[in-house]
């Protein structure tokens, strides 16, 4: 875990719901499994492909889809 992910994880209070916007870019892919392992409720936003990746690393079934500016379809 990098310093940014560690600093963000340290700020999350136990039992909260965390929405991660654009969860497949930057630091966010590291945060999703860390938060999921800490038993936090994680709701990421991602495209269809990104949503599948995030669910595989612990995001659960609650994924908010969006269409990127390149026309990539939202996750279901």
Image (cartoon, rainbow, N blue to C red):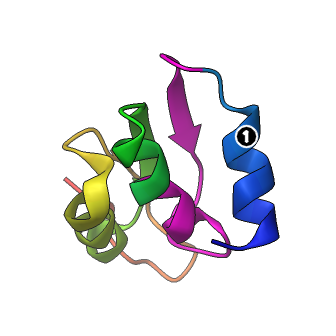
Work out whether residue 51 or residue 58 is closer to the camera in this orientation and state it. 58
Q: Residue furthest top?
A: 15
* Mark 1 secondary-structure assignment: helix
Residue positioned 21% across, 66% down in the render: 56
Q: Where is 66 relative to 49, above or below?
A: above
| Quarter of the image with the N terminus in it | bottom right
Q: Is residue 49 magenta?
A: no
Work out whether residue 63 or residue 32 is closer to the camera in this orientation and state it. 32
Question: At which x and y percent is residue 68?
Answer: 51, 71
The magenta region covers: 14-32
Q: Where is 21 relative to 74, above or below?
A: above
State which quadrant residue 58 falls in: bottom left
Is 44 displayed left or right of 52 in the figure? right
Q: Residue furthest bottom?
A: 70
Q: Where is 64 relative to 47, above or below?
A: above
Residue under numbered circle 1: 10
Work out whether residue 9 or residue 64 is closer to the camera in this orientation and state it. 9
Q: Where is 41 relative to 66, above or below?
A: above
State which quadrant residue 43 falls in: top left
Residue positioned 44% across, 64% down in the render: 67
Question: At which x and y percent is residue 59?
Answer: 31, 50
Residue positioned 72% across, 73% down in the render: 2
Residue positioned 55% across, 20% down in the render: 14
State which quadrant residue 6 falls in: bottom right
Q: How many numbered marks appear?
A: 1
Question: At which x and y percent is residue 74?
Answer: 33, 61
Q: Is residue 30 magenta?
A: yes
- Label 1, residues with CA under 10 Å away: few <14, some 14-19, many ≥20: few
């Amino acid at each position: 875990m990098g310093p940014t992910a560690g600093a963000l994880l340290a700020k999350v209070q136990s039992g909260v719901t965390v929405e991660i916007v654009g969860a497949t870019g930057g630091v966010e892919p590291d945060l999703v499994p860390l938060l999921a392992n800490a038993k936090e409720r994680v709701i990421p936003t991602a495209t269809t492909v990104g949503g599948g990746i995030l669910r595989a690393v612990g995001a659960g079934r609650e994924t908010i889809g969006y269409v990127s500016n390149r026309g990539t379809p939202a996750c279901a």
